[in-house]
Image (cartoon, helix red, strand yellow):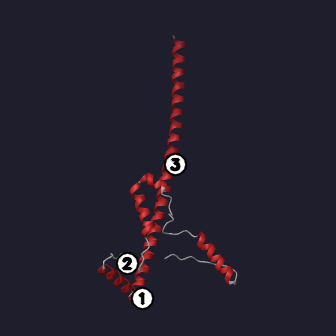
Amino acid sequence: MTLVWVSTASHDVRDVIEHAAHVLATAQDPHTAPVADLDPLMELDPYLAEQVQVMHREWSVNPWSITPPSSSVTGQLFGTGQRIIRKLTWWYSLPQWQQISTFHGATVRTTDTLLAHLLAIKAQINQNATTHAEQRLHDLEQQMRAAQQRLDAVEQQNRTTL
């Protein structure tokens, strides 16, 4: 279940309906819209990226879904029985299904946040490594120039003494 909040200052029903239609048209479906950018994740771990995609597709629990019945008479009776039981017990099972869906949604959002932080930390580590590598390279170049100058000075001194 997805909740979409609509707020408008108008008290005209047509304006509210038009605004609601606009909000619904521009809202992203949480079942299909990925929250995290999975390209860097695919480079890190393709299996993890695949599982994140499955998690985004399957997080919502539908209490009204039934096992697809087979075409036989027994299968049709089984499907009808499932529908009847779901309709008779909705008042009992709905709070549990809502709690499960809320937890699954929170888990998916938390995982997305953790993955975003992981990717940011990895980028920071790479940047720091590059920055420190450049600094070390610069320091080594200075040391080599100093060593070359000392070598040139020693060679110059040797030439003058010979």
| Label whose residue precedes the other's in the sequence (1 or 3) | 1
Q: Nearer the viewer, mark 3 or mark 2?
A: 2
Q: Distance between the Cα atoms at labels 1 and 2? A: 17 Å
Please, what secondary structure does the residue beneath circle 3 have? Answer: helix
Which residue matches tag 2? Answer: 66
Q: Amino acid at mark 3?
A: Gln
Which residue matches tag 1? Answer: 91
| Label whose residue precedes the other's in the sequence (1 or 2) | 2
Q: Indicate the position of residue 129 as horizontal and vertical percent values.
A: 49, 46
Residue in the picture at 48% in, 57% down: 38
Please, what secondary structure does the residue beneath circle 1 have? Answer: helix
142 up-or-down from 46: above or below: above
Instruction: Check if mark 1's residue and mark 3's residue have beta carbons within 8 Å.
Output: no
Q: Distance between the Cα atoms at labels 1 and 3? A: 55 Å
Q: Amino acid at mark 1?
A: Trp
Q: Indicate the position of residue 97 as horizontal and vertical percent values.
A: 41, 80
Instruction: Check if mark 3's residue and mark 2's residue have beta carbons within 8 Å.
Output: no
Q: Indicate the position of residue 52 as horizontal and vertical percent values.
A: 43, 62
Q: Indicate the position of residue 59 as horizontal and vertical percent values.
A: 43, 70
Q: Residues within 10 Å of mark 3 (few under 14, many from 20)?
A: few
Numbered circle sitting on residue 24: none
Which is more toward the observer, 119 or 152? 119
Residue in the picture at 51% in, 37% down: 137
Q: Nearer the viewer, mark 1 or mark 2?
A: 2
Q: Amino acid at mark 2?
A: Ile
Numbered circle sitting on residue 127: 3
Residue in the picture at 51% in, 15% down: 158
Q: Residues within 10 Å of mark 2 (few under 14, many from 20)?
A: some
